[in-house]
Amino acid sequence: MPLHLLWLSLGLLGALQAQAQDSPSPLIPAPPLSKVPLQQNFQDNEFQGKWYVVGLSGNAIGREGQDSPKMYATIYELKEDKSYNVTSVLFRKGKCDYWIRTFVPSSQPGEFKLGNIESHPGLTSYIVRVVSTDYEQYAMVFFRKVSHNREYFKVTLYGRTKKLTSDLKENFTRFSKSLGLTENHIVFPVPIDQCIDG
Ligand SMILES: *[C@@H]1O[C@H](CO)[C@@H](O)[C@H](O)[C@H]1NC(C)=O
Ligand SMILES: *[C@@H]1O[C@H](CO)[C@@H](O)[C@H](O)[C@H]1NC(C)=O
């Protein structure tokens, strides 16, 4: 290649990279809700209690360039008004972090929206749908939110224990892929003992 053309292409490459850094990287579009099943006859009382996050997938979840995330747990407690008090506990920087929010029942049993959304800066929409659960062993839950005008979605595979059968994990992987996600967007957090056993 003549030298001046090489310089030209290098210059172009630099310009393209600069452009890519300016705008946030594109996200896999969220699926239409018609692609997301809903657990029939959802029993809110039976769903209560602690769930370990055994699997996690989503358009902002990735395993490149980072260690596998540590397992965390989410506790659902029904309040008198049938909303859930939802507490996640994470082990971060050597201590236990708690994250508390409210899920308010929405159009059908098993569907929720975030309570008090005004208190979350930039968040304009947040929905939760329980895809399937047997209450005693596992659950798959779909989340979709719009934050600062970007649409994120994720699926959690919850277990009552830190380990689930490979069948359940494969079903979760299959479901995640049916929503447009690839292997790179599916992680299985590493079980830990700190914070999440209490
Ligand atoms: C919600 O959960 C948190 C943490 O477990 C607890 O401190 C709080 O009292 C609960 N609130 C209600 C209304 O149950
Ligand atoms: C498998 O995933 C589908 C969603 O794709 C769900 O409807 C079904 O209940 C799941 N089965 C099990 C055993 O997890």
Image (tube, grey):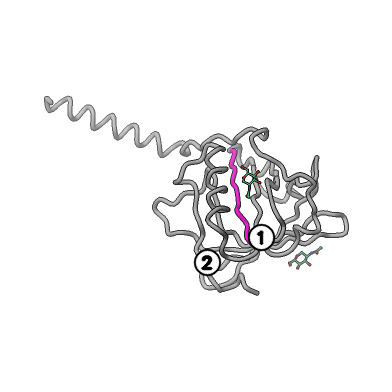
Quick one: which residue is furthest to the right in this view? Answer: 80
Q: Position of residue 1 (x, y in %)?
A: 13, 26
**Ligand 2 within 8 angstroms of badge 1 C-beta:** no
Q: Between disc 1 and disc 2, whose residue precedes?
A: 1
Amino acid at the residue labelled 1: Gln
For residue 12, side relative to residue 103 (left or right): left
Q: Position of residue 108 (x, y in %)?
A: 80, 41
Within the displayed image, which quadrant is ligand 1 positioned in? bottom right
- For this rendering, which residue is in front, 136 or 53? 136
The residues colored magenta run 151-159
Pointer 2: residues within 10 angstroms few (<14), some, or many (20+)? some
**Compared with residue 132, is residue 198 higher up or lower down, i.e. above or below?**
below
- In three-dimensional space, the C-alpha distance between marks 1 and 2, rounded to whole angstroms, equals 16 Å
Dot 2: element: loop
**Compared with residue 93, is residue 149 higher up or lower down, i.e. above or below?**
above
**Compared with residue 142, is residue 13 higher up or lower down, i.e. above or below?**
above
Give yes or no for residue 175 being in the magenta stretch.
no
Give the residue number, with chain letter if any, for mark 2.
Answer: 191
Give the residue number, with chain letter if any, for mark 1.
Answer: 137
- Magenta-colored segment: predominant secondary structure: strand
Q: Quadrant of the C terminus?
A: bottom right
Q: Position of residue 139 (x, y in %)?
A: 66, 54
For residue 190, side relative to residue 79 (left or right): left
**Compared with residue 191, is residue 57 higher up or lower down, i.e. above or below?**
above
Mark number for residue 15?
A: none
Number of numbered callouts drawn: 2
Picture residue at 36% right of the left edge, 36% below the top: 18
Picture residue at 65% right of the left edge, 57% below the top: 138
- For this rendering, which residue is in front, 37 or 88? 37
